[in-house]
Image (cartoon, grey):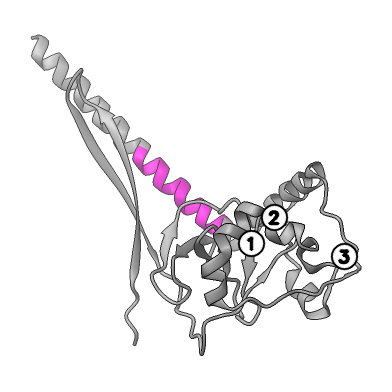
Amino acid sequence: MKKLILGTALLTVVIAISGQAMAAVDVSVRFPLPPPIVFPAPPEVVVMPDTPDVYVAPDVAVDIFFWNGWWWRPWEGRWYRSHYYNRGWAYYGHVPRFYFDVDPGWRGYYRDHTWYGHRWNYERIPNQRLQQNWKSWQTNRYWEKRGTWGVQGYQARPQQQRQELRNQRQAQYQQRPEVQRHNQLMQDQHRKYETHQGQQNKQHHGEESEHRR
């Protein structure tokens, strides 16, 4: 049986003990890392329309994204990122802000070469070219200006409409069972910390009372 490698998210909270003395309390949550993905070759990616230069790997069965110099993947309601597509994954404590710009139905649009009724002539980008150019592409808004991400006759959505879509997708994301399980786990850990903090404060007040006698 393969060993399960555990990733650790450390939430460190500092509690005041006296005017100058401080004590640190660590509340640790251990999360398993996602299973490895076997790549026969470096993945080619496609840039997603209506996104801030978010790239997807369409040949991979699970969702894996490239954005802002990192590879990203969701797993069991949590997010992980790495500078490498095939190793080095680490737990990331938030939903990356690009994610709600990604249309959940992108795989179907990719398969049909259409994007909301428009012909989508996407370009498959080799990994080496991506690594060499992603930063300048992002800075210059290369894909948006160069034929609106390869979608013929398409105009980028107005900012207000994009924000409304983000809000809808965020609400739908929070309803996923795996996300709700993860959120419940984090809430339980927060309650444990608050209980610990209350015990520490009670002990501190008791010690102060003893010193005054």
In reply to whether residue 182 is colored magenta, the answer given is yes
| Residue 101, x across and y down, in percent | 69, 55
Q: Secondary structure at mark 2?
A: helix
Residue 17: give x, y in percent of width and height.
21, 25
User: Residue 116: which numbered mark, if any?
Assistant: 3
The magenta stretch is 180-193
Tag in front: 2 or 1:
1
Q: Which residue is mark 1?
A: 54
- Asked whether residue 103 is in view, the answer is yes
Residue 41 position, x and y percent, is: 52, 87
From the viewer's side, name the closer residue of 142 and 87: 142
The residue carrying mark 2 is: 101
- What's the residue at 20%, 29% (across, down)? 22
In this view of the protein, can residue 102 be seen by the observer? no
- At x 55%, y 58%, the residue is 135
At label 3, which amino acid type do we have?
Tyr
- Tell me whether the residue at label 1 lies in contact with that at label 3, contact meaning CB atoms closer than 8 angstroms: no
